[in-house]
Amino acid sequence: MGRGKIEIRRIDNSTSRQVTFSKRRSGLLKKAKELAILCDAEVGVMIFSSTGKLYDFSSTSMKSVMERYNKSKEVHHQMGNPTSELKFWQRETAMLRQQLQNLQENHRQMMGEELSGLSIKDLQNLENQLEMSLRGVRMKKDQILMDEILELNRKGNLIHQENMELYKKANLICHENQELYKKVYGTREVNGANRNSLLTNGLGMGEESHVPVHLQLSQPQQQNYDIPARATKLGYNFVHTTST
C-alpha cells in the first residue's frame, strides 16, 4: 500500500512535530547536496528550528552563497534604472581593481620583495605559505622521480628477458653445431674442437641460464681452409679449420 496523503498544517503533538522536523530536515539537506553534485549548482540551505537552532548546508561556503545572492538581488533591482546600473558597475570595477592590486602585492611578497612593511606575524604566515608550497613541489618531484624509476626498472627487466632469450638461442646454436660436427667428423675429432670453440665464444653449456650475456663483435681472423676427402665423398661442403 502507498503512503497516504497528510494534511499540510502545523502538527499539534510536540513529539510528532519534532520527529517530522528531524526526518524532513535530513531529507531536505540530502536533496540539496545531491542537487549540488549532480547539477554542478551552488546551493545554500538554512533551517531554523522552532527552538532557534540553526541547520545549514552550502556547496561552497555560506558566506559566498549569501554574497552572490545579495549581489544578484541588487543587480536585479538596479538593472531597470540606468543611473543605479552605472553605479553598480563602477563599484564592481573598483572592487576588481582592488583584488588585482592585492594579488600583485601578494605575488611580490612571495618572490621576497616589498617585505619591509610586514609585521612578524605577517612574515610567519608568508613563511608558512612558502613552506607549504615548497612541500607540494617536493612531493610532486618525488612522485615524478618514482614513476621514472619504475619505468626504467620495467625496461631493464624487458632487456634482461631479451638477453636471456638470446643466450638460450646461442646455446641452442652451439648444440646444433656440435651435433653436425659429430655427424661429419665423429665423436673423437669434435670433442676437443667444440670444447675450445665453446670456451672461445663464452657460451659454455654448463653456465647458469639466468646469467646475462654480454655479446660483442670481433674481427674475423684469416685462416686456411681445405676440404677433407671424407667430406667430399659424402657430398657436403663443410669447412675444416687448420691451425696456422
Image (tube, rainbow, N blue to C red):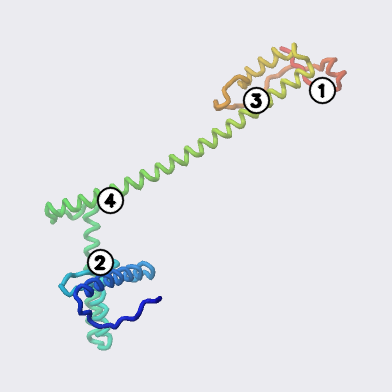
> Which residue is located at x 25 percent, y 85 percent?
77
For the residue marked with disc 2, what is the amino acid? Ser
- The residue indicated by pointer 3 is 171
Q: Nearer the viewer, mark 4 or mark 2?
A: 2
* Quadrant of the snapshot with the N terminus: bottom left
Q: CA distance from mark 3 to mark 4?
A: 57 Å
Whether label 1 touches label 2, CB < 8 Å: no
Q: Are marks 4 and 2 in contact (CB under 8 Å)?
A: no
Which tag, 3 or 1, sits closer to the chain's start?
A: 3
- Identified by mark 4, the residue type is Ser
Q: CA distance from mark 4 to mark 2?
A: 24 Å
Question: Residue 79 vs residue 232: left or right?
Answer: left
Residue type at mark 1: give it.
Asn
How dense is the environment of label 2, judged by Cα within 10 Å: few (below 14), some, or many (20 and up)? Answer: few
- Quarter holding the C terminus? top right
Identify the element where label 4 is drawn.
helix
> Mark 1 or mark 2, which is nearer to you?
2
Q: Residue at x 29, y 83 (%)?
A: 7
